[in-house]
Image (cartoon, helix red, strand yellow):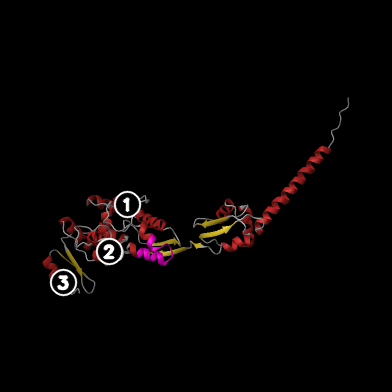
Amino acid sequence: MANKKRSKLPVILLVILIVIALAVAGVYVYGIVNNDIAGKNQEDKPYTLVIEKSDFEYEVGQKLAANGVIVSDTVWTNWMSSHYPDFEYINGEYNMNSNMSYEDIAQKLQNPDISHKSVKVCIPEGTNVMQIADILEKNNICSADAFLEVCKSTDGFDFDFLKTVPDTDIIGYRLEGFLFPATYDFAMNSDARDIAEQMLEAFDYRITDDMTAFCENNNMSMFELITLASVVQEEALGQNSAKNIASVFMNRLKKGAKLQSDVTYFYARDLRDSYGFSQEVYDAYYTYRCQGLPAGPITNSGMEIIDAVVNYPQTDYLYFFSDLQQKFHFAKDYDEFVRLQKQYPWK
């Protein structure tokens, strides 16, 4: 019995139908892509794009696609490469809408509604928290009030050294002393907490074994070491004088005597008169009134001063002053102190 040949017509029809379907689908997709590029027939859907410092071009496209501003991050990336090959993305926040054309989006991305442009900000050694807040505000990083509010509490910050900060209401700004002075690249219009976090991280990175050993050997907490260093920072005119000044304060602490440091008055006064803290807080910082160390640090010290405190020399000094030539003189007792003041004019 002869084999019957199968008809090729159904196969040909199937191929034709597939080609037609692909062509229709291609036209449909082409229409969607073209409408997306032109911003036509798109829904009205707002979205705020945030470009962070760590974002790259493809991540921007992914954010736009994931939130319905564009239909494909691949199409967007190819379009940008063709039309704006040297485009630079600016950190910031952009109020966008899904009915924007690609050209509209590209233009918008050159003008953020809220800029997060990186700004180099220098925080000098010996700058207190109130001064840091002013520097941040002047550089449009965050508001001074917001930063100061964050610095009143250690809540939300996960650093072991902050666990040494006493739980008491007589401390003005609890992050004072740990906001490491350095030059930073901060983003404009940042959250104040994020800025504080970066500065605290910088301090944490610089904690040394010598600092830890000093605390253990002198029965001090890290908070007390940094408090002492802050007073030395304000009194000293460099590392050489800082070491002897630190020895004076350590000798006074060991004797149970008041530090009687003039620089603590100015900090206490500013807390009370300019920032609304109580008389009790003032008294706790002013070392002519309080016993031992002030309630907390009065500035943010650099590593040079911290090292000077940690490596202070063993002396018998209990008094010091600087003369009109800014030279420091040290005395073992009050009589020698008075004699030196008469010998070297100081005011």
Instruction: Give amino acid for label 1.
Output: Leu
Pointers 1 and 3 in contact (C-beta within 8 Å): no
Q: Which residue is mark 1?
A: 162
Judging depth in this view, the residue of 191 and 58 nearest the camera is: 191
Q: Would you say 276 lies left or right of 253 here?
A: right
Pointers 1 and 2 in contact (C-beta within 8 Å): no
Nearer to us of marks 1 and 3 is 1
Looking at the figure, which quarter contains the N terminus?
top right
Q: Residue at x 61, y 62 (%)?
A: 104
Q: Earlier in the sequence, mark 3 or mark 2?
A: 2
- Main secondary structure of the magenta stretch: helix
Residue 308 % position (x, y): 26, 60
Instruction: Give amino acid for label 3.
Output: Gln
Which residue lies most toward the right here?
1
Q: Which residue is mark 2?
A: 272
Q: Which residues are magenta?
A: 131-146
Instruction: Give amino acid for label 2.
Output: Arg
Q: Would you say 203 lies left or right of 308 here?
A: right
Judging depth in this view, the residue of 191 and 263 nearest the camera is: 191
Whether the magenta-drawn stretch holds residue 114 is answered as no
Q: Is residue 163 above or below residue 100?
A: above
Pointers 3 and 2 in contact (C-beta within 8 Å): no
Judging depth in this view, the residue of 176 and 148 nearest the camera is: 148
Residue 294 % position (x, y): 23, 59
Looking at the figure, which quarter contains the C terminus?
bottom left
